[in-house]
Image (cartoon, grey):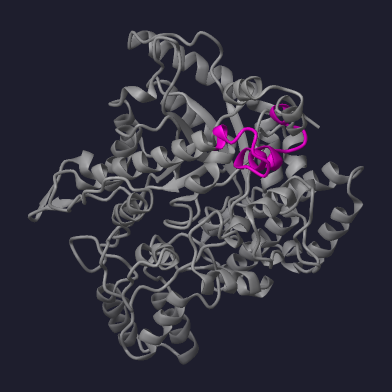
Amino acid sequence: MRIIKGHSFHIPVLGVGYSIDTPINVAPFGISSVISLVDDSLMEKMREFYCHKFDMPFKAISKKVDDFRAKRITSYLNVVEEIVERKFDELKKSVLNTGSELDKYLDLLPDTSSLKNKLNLGEKGRKTAEDFSKRVKEFLFPGSIDVNIMTKLDQVNQKDGVDLPIEYNDAHAALRGFANSKLSSSLVLSAGMSPRLYSYIENFEDFFPDEKGLIKKKIILKVSDFRSALVQGKMLAAKGLWISEYRIESGVNCGGHAFPTNGVLFGPILEEFKQNRQQLLDTCLEAYKAALEKKSLPQPATEPELIVSAQGGVGNNEEHNFLLDYYNMDSVGWGSPFMLVPEVISIDTDTMNLLAKGKENDYYFSGLSPLGVPFNSIKGASMSVRRLELAANGKAGTPCTKGFLRYNTEYTEKPICTSSREYQQKKLVDLQALNLPEAEYKKAYDKIIEPECLCVGLGASTKISKGMKVAESEKVTVCPGPNLAYFSKITSLKEMVDHIYGRTNILDKMPRPNMFIKEMNMYLDIFKERVEKFLNNMDDVKEKRNLEKFKKNLFDGIDYYRNLFADKKTEILEELDSLIKKYPVLNKEL
């Protein structure tokens, strides 16, 4: 087992609102987490909430103010940082108090932490208060207050009916909001490549090394394969921008939006990073140094940090350690299980109970997202209930009040959202005109009304949990990964961290598949569905080629797991064989 300094896990972004204040709850204990920068209006409400709670001055930033989105984001992040600093300072001052926040900080650390050994609680009685206080101040550090931007959420904004310059686009403004904040942390870029957004990063000096070679604002790139990491890493390095961390996420076994590969499984992807990590470093470093020289910026005094982490479906200490020890990951993301830890995230009681009671069949791969990207969710969330009721009453769709996901121009010149009433009503009129058979009509109807308002739904739970006023129409969308089906206990931060580090077990007693087998099961379902659809249109030559490649990737992955676990885990091989037998479609010729 490797010796680490602090924690070996991080908490990824959880929807728009669920992790919006998570750093306030966990950063003082050295745990890093991620805030979504999608909804500036929600951040404004949260800033007001926390300013009142911590007796800090608050002045609202109206939408009438120029660049209000960026300014709201900057202001909220500065408030979060100040609160974390206050709490962390108080923690360090509680050195000799039994049962203090410092005790909690050290108690949460993994037993393999070098920091835990340096600041052993038993030393309190053997050292003077002054000496122990010095050691605490020297070695203790807070968790990182990181932020996430989905690069594709970069729609053009208008003022008085006129398009604003590109820097006022949603993602650009969010980037500027972070760049202008006081934070010294990381920007997580997700949802694919955006060359124009990457170029915009060059406008902010905090992303470049200072005279000591230190970078105040680092970049984390969320990726699903090695090639994408290499291409984007080199692209940014050529601009003098260093990717400090590559965060590998399962294409399907994750919370929220999913980006499935063409059948390439998580294990082989991690293996490729393991085998080619040095190539990634060398390639990017060469381009990085050349770019810094061209910009007359300081060269790094030492080799820059390159962290590789993984997330997606991890559920127990054995899997956690396997990712760290076998694949040499530097950190492991634990997301969905924290949706049952109200001490950590902002979630209303009804939704949390829904998640706690959910079983395997309740968690599903949905079409809820207006982006047209698969979206992991759970049956019975209040926004879905309301959506179906509205459609049954002839009022499919919802009023579009925030507009972050307006992308469709099928019926309009200006983009609209596919979850909006405007879009769904037009689409249903067209469907009626087709006079389809009943079964075919029902399938098309369900697909049209499935997208729901994520802009409101992913923030409503946060507002309810904080006792804020919510309109009757503000219902909850929730985005857990399927792994949460095996957790049913609403728990504390201490219990969840102890579970991660193997000091306790909070999993249900029901059988839980290995994380790699669960992901493969999801890909097999996708393959089966695509094959069935192809059989209704066998003239689609392109899809036939794609399915043949998908099938080959699946078999390559299966062979990889057979070799990987041959001498380690025979029960995983048994799971694998049992699963494959359920999919005879694998043995059919296309």
- 178 up-or-down from 516: above or below: above
Q: Is residue 268 magenta?
A: no
Query: In the displayed structure, does residue 383 sit left or right of residue 581?
Result: left
Query: In the displayed structure, does residue 156 sit left or right of residue 197?
Result: left
Q: Quadrant of the C terminus?
A: bottom right
| Residue 183 x/y as whole percent | 39, 33
| Residue 525 x/y as whole percent | 65, 65
Q: Quadrant of the N terminus?
A: top right
The extreme left residue here reads 160
- 571 up-or-down from 350: above or below: above
Query: In the displayed structure, does residue 297 sit left or right of residue 1?
Result: left
Count of labels shown? 0
Q: Nearer the viewer, residue 558 or 565?
A: 565
Specify whether residue 60 is in view.
yes
What residue is drawn where x is 65% and y is 43%?
A: 104
| Residue 439 x/y as whole percent | 50, 88
Quarter of image, res 141: top right
Q: Nearer the viewer, residue 68 or 295?
A: 68
What residue is drawn where x is 68% and y is 48%?
A: 497
Query: In the displayed structure, does residue 496 sit left or right of residue 290?
Result: right
**Which range is magenta?**
91-116
Specify whether residue 535 is in view.
no
| Residue 247 x/y as whole percent | 56, 38
Q: Is residue 92 magenta?
A: yes
